[in-house]
């Protein structure tokens, strides 16, 4: 046995590798059989749970409140929101009605479909929800428009329009010129749009309610934007649980747009956000994957200089990865959205084992009599370092188990087991493969690599150590400026439709997606709680079921009754037969003449509007153009009349009149009442979000909703990392002290890791790289690499005796290429279009650079200063 095989670990490593080298076929065949069986089980039984609901322990208070609300109102969970934008309120209504009808024909895609604005209860009683002043203003406008509406109801055509406008223009002094000008301008806009080939229609609802052409909402309840809410049937066993429902809605959106009914249909809500994020990750991951593969391959060949050694290390890595997936199946049974990253962590750390083993094998081969002896010597020499690295990394991963961050705890459990798999594969599969492939055993330019930095480090070791200490202190001063971006929406592609729509709605207080929800035992308690919340300056409107019973109904119904009396002729009119082509042409000619007279009568708004309409009509020539214009003008007229007829049938209502479809949204099956609170201000950033959530939780600790879930989840994650870091630090220090049996060597292992962490933190502050839910995964990877690098260099110093001699061995080269392959593997994520992946790649790049500086410059300087040679540390080589 070689001198390197004196400790217990060394003896086990020596024996294990020696056996693998003597019986390579047996070892490799056994490994492949185990791998095949594991792969069969993983493919057949390892599922993926893409739900984000259980990423944090259900025992955390805010999760308990969220779960309680979900149980009370399961129909509100995971809603897909279809946002319909149309040129006119009438078209938006028609499109929403059509879409809802088509969606309800597919219960296999949608378990719930809800169109709030389309509820008959709200359509009939919508006027009662206006303030008394708003209702009176609308009544006055309708009173003035009643003659126009009555005449057109009797003849809704260009013929009837020409007669009405001719009368109005002839008697404009009595009719009120300023009120007529907007009508002529709207008609001109439609004619101009038709001449330009644009699909514009006249909105009668906007016209009579006083809404501007650019406005979105009017006092008749019309809105150019409609929301359809749906609960898609989701399969969480796949990566895209709501894909069929989303595909159906996108198809319907294209169809409605092609029909000219809508401007666009956009999707948002958690199902759409999650799916588009996966699409973005997949797209960015393809580019990053190609760059990673090329980069890692080149670095492995550059570092190992042997295709056979590279092949052996890669095979051991892949087998270890499959074994780790098998551990995931046995230990957890499924993967969550965080634990799927176990492969990323395993590759980043697993290749470290292969590189260290392979380079040490090439170094031992220069002195050993044969390949088997070189492999056995490698096993004995490196067993302690690799085992200690694996155990320390596993301790770091397993430190997440006691935390409330369940998603990361499962990742830690799987990755911790993966370190064991990587260690076993490195002492069995790798040496067996090397024994079979019989690579050329030489390590070119090894001394030259050490000489590149060794001279400078030895000469300036004190200066380097002191400068590093000062640099670390300076970095520590920046720690209070570290930031954690806890809003998941900031990690998503801002160009994605669901994200852009979400942000747009978030900026609108009345449509905000950032609402808070509460449960109370009954409606009476809910109303009292709502009144208390309304007193908070941070809270805007607060809704309960009681909000759907209008106030001051008697006074408002008097106004509605008066409106019905002077509009009744409109509803009793029987339309004449539609005109023919000649009648339309004659009507337009008649109207043009009247417009010409009005245009020449002055320079006021009416004259300008008349001239504009006359010029626009002159561009519409031929029967087909006039027929199309008539359709564009009157397509929304009958919907207006129908809406008015319905709205004027309003009656006094109470809680018992609210339909079950609406009541079930606010009263649970067991009688508990829902409260929904909106922010009084726009929520534009994380500070606004946290301020709103904290203000409500201060008076209602059991509140839930996106603002609270996001802010509390971030605090849970930060607390989990602090807790896990302390556990990991204590565990790793204990392991190092037990194994190394020296405090100074333990501190030497930890020193470069601490400095790298401080440098990474300082760089993140200086470059504006906030920590977030995606890039925090870099921290355990940095921990594993940092501890591993320190262990290898410190143990190699023990073996070599002098600190400077370490740099002349294969160990620094292994540390360098291990870090560079990790950088090549995941640093390419910085080029991804997905913000989360980009931030992960950026932070990893910074941390790897910091780690290389700490381990290949600072640590060798410390070793050279503290252990200058046999004369400076007598007997060190004997350890």
Image (cartoon, rainbow, N blue to C red):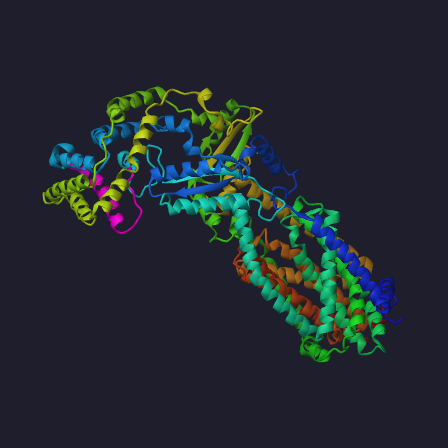
Residue 188: quarter of image: top left
Q: Magenta part mainly helix, strand or loop?
A: helix
Residue 729 visible in this rendered orientation of the protein: no
In the image, residue 224 above or below residue 735: above
| Rendered-image quadrant of the C terminus | bottom right
Relative image position of residue 400 (x, y in whole percent): 69, 49
In the image, residue 741 lies in the stretch drawn in magenta: no
Q: Is residue 192 left or right of residue 747?
A: left
- Identified at 56% across, 55% down, the residue is 281
In the image, residue 832 above or below residue 462: above
- Identified at 62% across, 69% down, the residue is 295
In the image, residue 609 above or below residue 553: below
Q: Is residue 302 left or right of residue 799?
A: left
Q: Is residue 755 left or right of residue 20?
A: left
Residue 659 visible in this rendered orientation of the protein: yes
Relative image position of residue 107 (x, y in whole percent): 53, 36
Q: Which residues are magenta?
A: 176-203
| Rendered-image quadrant of the N terminus | bottom right
Relative image position of residue 331 (x, y in whole percent): 74, 48
């Amino acid at each position: 046995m070689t001198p390197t095989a004196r400790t217990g670990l060394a003896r086990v490593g020596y024996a294990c590798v020696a056996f693998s080298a003597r019986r390579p076929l047996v070892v490799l065949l056994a490994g492949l059989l185990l791998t095949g069986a594991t792969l069969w089980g993983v493919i057949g039984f390892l599922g993926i749970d893409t739900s984000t609901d259980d990423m944090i322990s259900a025992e955390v208070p805010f999760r308990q409140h969220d779960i309680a609300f979900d149980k009370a109102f399961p129909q509100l969970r995971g809603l897909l929101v279809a946002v319909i934008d149309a040129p006119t309120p009438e078209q938006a209504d028609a499109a929403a009605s059509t879409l809802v009808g088509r969606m309800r024909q597919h219960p296999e895609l949608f378990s719930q479909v809800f169109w709030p604005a389309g509820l008959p209860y709200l359509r009939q009683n919508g006027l009662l929800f206006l303030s008394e002043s708003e209702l009176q203003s609308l009544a006055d406008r309708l009173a003035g428009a009643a003659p126009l509406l009555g005449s057109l109801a009797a003849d809704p055509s260009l013929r009837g329009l020409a007669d009405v406008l001719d009368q109005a223009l002839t008697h404009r002094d009595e009719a009120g010129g300023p009120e007529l000008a907007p009508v002529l301008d709207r008609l001109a806009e439609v004619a101009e749009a038709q001449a330009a080939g644009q699909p514009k229609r006249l909105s009668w609802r906007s016209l009579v309610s006083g809404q501007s052409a650019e406005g979105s909402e009017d006092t008749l309840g019309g809105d150019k934007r409609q929301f359809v809410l749906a609960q898609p049937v989701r399969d969480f066993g796949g990566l895209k649980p709501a894909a069929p429902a989303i595909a159906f809605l996108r198809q319907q959106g294209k169809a409605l747009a092609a029909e000219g009914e809508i401007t666009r249909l956009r999707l948002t809500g958690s199902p759409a956000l999650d799916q588009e994020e996966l699409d973005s990750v997949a797209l960015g991951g393809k580019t990053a994957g190609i760059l990673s593969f090329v980069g890692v391959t080149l670095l492995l060949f550059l570092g190992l200089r042997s295709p056979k050694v590279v092949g052996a290390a890669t095979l051991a890595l892949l087998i270890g990865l499959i074994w780790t997936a098998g551990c995931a199946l046995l230990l957890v049974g499924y993967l969550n959205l965080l634990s799927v990253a176990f492969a990323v962590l395993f590759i980043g750390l697993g290749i470290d084992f292969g590189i260290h083993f392979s380079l040490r094998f090439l170094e031992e081969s220069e002195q050993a009599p044969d390949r088997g002896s070189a492999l056995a010597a490698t096993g004995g020499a490196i067993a302690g370092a690799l085992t200690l690295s694996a155990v320390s990394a596993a301790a770091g991963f397993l430190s997440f188990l006691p935390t409330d961050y369940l998603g990361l705890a499962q990742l830690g459990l799987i990755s911790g087991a993966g370190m064991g798999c990587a260690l076993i594969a490195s002492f069995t599969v790798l040496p067996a493969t090397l024994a079979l492939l019989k690579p050329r055993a030489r390590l070119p330019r090894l001394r030259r690599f050490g000489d590149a930095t060794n001279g400078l480090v030895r000469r300036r070791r004190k200066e380097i150590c002191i400068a590093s200490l000062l640099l670390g202190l300076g970095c520590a001063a920046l720690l209070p400026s570290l930031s954690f971006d806890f809003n998941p929406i900031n990690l998503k592609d801002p160009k994605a439709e669901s994200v852009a729509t979400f942000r747009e709605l978030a900026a609108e207080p009345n449509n905000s997606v950032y609402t808070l929800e509460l449960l109370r035992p009954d409606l009476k308690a809910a109303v009292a709680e709502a009144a208390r919340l309304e007193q908070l300056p941070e809270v805007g409107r607060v809704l309960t079921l009681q909000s759907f019973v209008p106030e001051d109904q008697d006074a408002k119904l008097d106004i509605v009754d008066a409106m019905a009396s002077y509009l009744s002729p409109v509803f009793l009119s029987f339309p004449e037969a539609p005109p023919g082509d000649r009648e339309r042409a004659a009507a337009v000619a008649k109207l043009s003449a009247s417009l010409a007279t009005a245009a020449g009568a002055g320079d006021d708004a009416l004259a300008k509007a008349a001239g504009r309409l006359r010029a626009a009509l002159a561009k519409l020539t031929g029967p087909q153009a006039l027929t199309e214009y008539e359709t564009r003008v009157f397509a929304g007229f009958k919907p207006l009349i129908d809406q008015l007829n319905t709205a004027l049938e309003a009656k006094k209502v109470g809680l018992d009149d609210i339909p079950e479809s609406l009541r079930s949204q606010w009263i649970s099956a067991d009688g508990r009442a829902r409260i929904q609170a909106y922010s009084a201000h726009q929520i534009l950033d994380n500070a606004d979000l946290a301020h709103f959530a904290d203000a409500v939780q201060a008076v209602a600790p059991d509140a839930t909703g996106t603002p609270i879930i996001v802010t509390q989840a971030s605090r849970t994650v930060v607390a989990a990392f602090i807790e896990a870091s302390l556990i990991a630090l204590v565990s790793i220090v204990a392991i190092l002290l037990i194994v190394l049996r020296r405090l100074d060597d333990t501190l030497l292992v930890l020193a470069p890791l601490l400095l790298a962490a401080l440098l990474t933190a300082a760089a993140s502050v200086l470059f504006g790289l906030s920590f977030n839910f995606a890039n925090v995964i870099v921290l355990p990877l940095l921990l594993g690499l940092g501890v591993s690098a320190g262990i290898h260099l410190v143990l190699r110093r023990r073996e070599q005796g002098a600190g400077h001699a370490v740099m002349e061995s294969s160990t620094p080269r292994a540390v360098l290429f291990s870090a560079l392959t990790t950088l090549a593997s995941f640093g390419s994520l910085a080029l991804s279009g997905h913000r989360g992946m980009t931030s992960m790649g950026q932070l990893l790049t910074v941390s790897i650079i910091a780690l290389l500086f700490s381990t290949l410059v600072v640590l060798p300087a410390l070793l050279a200063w503290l252990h200058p040679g046999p004369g400076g540390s007598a007997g060190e080589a004997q350890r």
